[in-house]
Amino acid sequence: MAKAKIKIYLSEPIGIITPTIYGHFAEHLGGVIYDGIWVGEQSDVPNVRGIRSALVEAMRKINPPVVRWPGGCFADHYDWRDGIGPKEKRPKRTNFWMLRDPKHPEETNAFGTHEFIDFCHQIGAEPYIVANVGSGSPKEFARWVEYCNCSADTSLTRERRANGSPKPFGVRYWGIGNENWGCGGHFTPEDYCAQYTRFATYAYDFGVGVRLIACGPSGNDLEWTRRFFEKLTQGRAGKFRAPIWGFAPHYYCGSAGTALEFTDSQWYQLLSQAAYMGTLIQEQWEAMAEYDPQHQVKLVVDEWGCWHPSGSEINPCHLYEQMSTLRDALAAALTLDIFNNHCNKVAMANLAQLVNNLHSLFLADGHRFVCTPNYYVFDMYKEHQGAKCLRTEFEADDISYTIDGEKRIVPGLWGSASVRESRLTLTLVNPGLGEPLETEIVLVKGEVKKAVQTVLTHRDIHAHNTFRAPDVLMPKSKELGVTGEKFTAELQRASVSKFTLALGT
Ligand code: AHR
């Protein structure tokens, strides 16, 4: 059996893993909102005020901290006023995506601000709303913030009350546009920065503690980052022309076979693409430090995940819907491990997207509903939320593979550890397709009293859950019967493992 060793340093914390690293994203795109979340009050699909009950029930189990909405590219096309007031009077509009794909339905606006806030309340998450910069104005944005957050008696707050919500929504997280280097207006970093400062100037706080998030680069584009911060600081490092809390790069991996068809090499290729997130975080952080040496601004990776070529949709109207296999589950798990280990830099992250889309947690179609393996990863990793991340050292042989005749390597093991009171959570990803990894786990300055191992794996790396076979990929737990400063555990090939360790003194 191949061997590995992990050391966990209990007295060397990296920082607190902010729960919002485990965030979600729901856009008016394909089947995400309509059919995924929103089935409508009159639907015979079980719902509460139009929102799919099965999805709410599943979400509540994984402690969702935050949901980003309404886009994505849709956000810079959206007029928030279309989505408030009596539903029968709401206008029917083109949707950003129907202008690109004729199969995409038009926008009914049945799901708007109140429905989104209701959804967040039902699942127990905070809302994160993205403003329209591309085709909107600072005035429209300022009025949306007032409608959501103001408690004074104004025409807008009376309207909110008349629409069923006397209390303000208290929305803290506001994104100033989405991908404004692309679908959000095709701005240069300087031009976007000028828009950012205008919009941010009019984001009145209303005592809510508003946190403004600027559009970051496509992937690891350091030029966008430098030029944006250069303009925002104008040569005075750490002094910003407008308030800013977060800076949001987007990173997708894919192009390694398709969702369901891939070779062993493409398995490693995709996981290696996912692991690039670590480089992106480090390099973006260093570039931001040139303008913000105290790191007042944190990274908000508000779109991440695997984006495979189309072909595995369950409903042709669900644009970008894809099946998620064990490979996607490992990509999600190792990305969450990377976020945990960079918890001093990453303030929020949002997997794209929640349901019926890219790297989704669920697939839903009418009455049919299933949790993908990505959902089970979020379930396994939820104990990390709000816990203290610990420094770890990993020893495992790299794995070599070949793509287009070129030899490449990928690390043989990923993971992260966190502790809360006397409970330690260690999550590990074994990407290897050969033998299991016999892994020695050493607690430096700590002792295990009880250990439970939970494993998500399958002998077929293409395995996935379907409506007919919903539990092909489900985690399984067993008690290990080990105690002391170290123990040895087997990490099955192609697996995600969680160790829940009760610590002794
Ligand atoms: O998540 C799908 C799309 O990907 C989003 O709308 C956009 O922001 C990104 O390009």
Image (cartoon, rainbow, N blue to C red):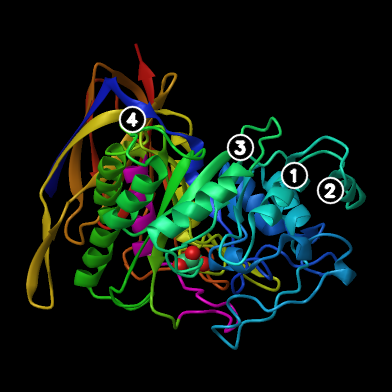
Task: Decide: few, some or many residues near mark 1? Use Cα within 10 Å; few <14, some 14-19, many ≥20.
Answer: many
Task: Decide: few, some or many residues near mark 2? Use Cα within 10 Å; few <14, some 14-19, many ≥20.
Answer: some
Q: Name the residue under label 3.
A: 210
Residue 191 located within the stretch drawn in magenta:
no
Distance (Cα) linking label 2 and label 3:
19 Å
Q: Residue at x 70, y 74 (%)?
A: 366
Q: What stretch is highlighted in magenta?
A: 312-339
Direction from residue 489 to residue 337 in the image, left or right: right
Please state which of residues 375 and 127 is positioned toward the viewer in this rendering: 127
Q: Earlier in the sequence, mark 4 or mark 2?
A: 2
Task: Decide: few, some or many residues near mark 4? Use Cα within 10 Å; few <14, some 14-19, many ≥20.
Answer: few
Q: Which residue is drawn at 49% across and 38% down?
A: 245
Query: Would you say the beta carbon of the disc 2 residue lies within 8 angstroms of ligand 1?
Result: no
Q: Which of marks 1 and 4 is in front?
A: 1
Q: Which of marks 2 and 1 is nearer the N terminus?
A: 1
Direction from residue 120 to residue 390 in the image, left or right: left
Amino acid type indicated by mark 3? Val
Q: Do the residues labelled 3 and 1 touch (CB within 8 Å)?
A: no
Q: Name the residue under label 1.
A: 146
Please state which of residues 204 and 268 is positioned toward the viewer in this rendering: 204
Distance (Cα) linking label 2 and label 1:
7 Å
